[in-house]
Amino acid sequence: MNLLTDIKTPEDVKTLVDAFYAKVNRDELLAPIFNETASVDWTEHLPKMYRFWESMLFGAGNYQGAPFPKHAVLPVEQAHFERWLTLFVETIDENFIGEKSEQAKNSAVCIADTFAQRMGVLTDPAALGRTRWPD
């Protein structure tokens, strides 16, 4: 039996990011956006995401960038944000439990909500719906 622990280290962040994007790459809704429309270079993107989440969760300050402009041009709808959130939360819940895990889920909700609103695809602000995921 594998007991889950919280996200504590950069290696934990790497585990989260790698597992999450493995799901994204298998997802029928999200994979085409990432791989065909955006033509993501995964060898470049994954290290950026490690730095992004390390900065979000640990205040590492090692992420430099402006993520919104690259996302703003993508042909996405509210359903894409909902799926992204679902996969992200599932990935955390499958691998981690604790305060930082909840912080990561809450941050993801805020990010998805902000991007969806700024892109004009959030038809119901309550739809992505939570300021916190249930404990």
Image: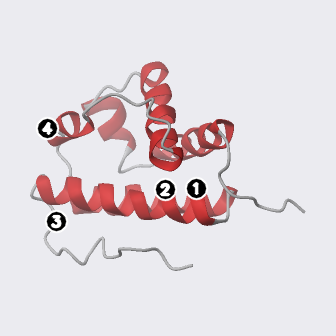
Q: Earlier in the sequence, mark 1 or mark 3?
A: 1
Residue type at the position of mark 1: Thr
Residue pointed to by mark 4:
73
- How packed is label 2: few (under 14 Cα within 10 Å), some, or many (20 or more)? many
Residue type at the position of mark 3: Leu
What element does badge 4 sit on?
loop
Residue 85 position, x and y percent, is 41, 60
Mark 2 → mark 3, Cα distance in angstroms: 19 Å
Q: Of the numbered discs in the image, which one, if any, rests on residue 122?
A: 3
Mark 4 → mark 2, Cα distance in angstroms: 22 Å
The residue drawn where x is 20% and y is 50% is 76
Q: Earlier in the sequence, mark 4 or mark 3?
A: 4
Horizontal relation, residue 110 to residue 8: left or right: left
Residue pointed to by mark 1:
91
Residue 109 position, x and y percent, is 36, 63
Horizontal relation, residue 8 to residue 65: left or right: right
- Residue 12 in view, yes or no: yes
Quarter holding the C terminus?
A: bottom right
Residue 26 position, x and y percent, is 50, 44
- How packed is label 4: few (under 14 Cα within 10 Å), some, or many (20 or more)? few
Mark 1 → mark 2, Cα distance in angstroms: 5 Å
Residue pointed to by mark 2:
88
The residue drawn where x is 30% and y is 30% is 36
- Does the residue at mark 1 contact the one at mark 2 (Cβ under 8 Å)? yes
What element does badge 1 sit on?
helix
Furthest-left residue in this view: 120
Mark 4 → mark 3, Cα distance in angstroms: 15 Å
- How packed is label 1: few (under 14 Cα within 10 Å), some, or many (20 or more)? many
What element does badge 2 sit on?
helix
Q: Nearer the viewer, residue 128 or 37?
A: 128
Residue 3 position, x and y percent, is 83, 62
Q: Earlier in the sequence, mark 4 or mark 2?
A: 4
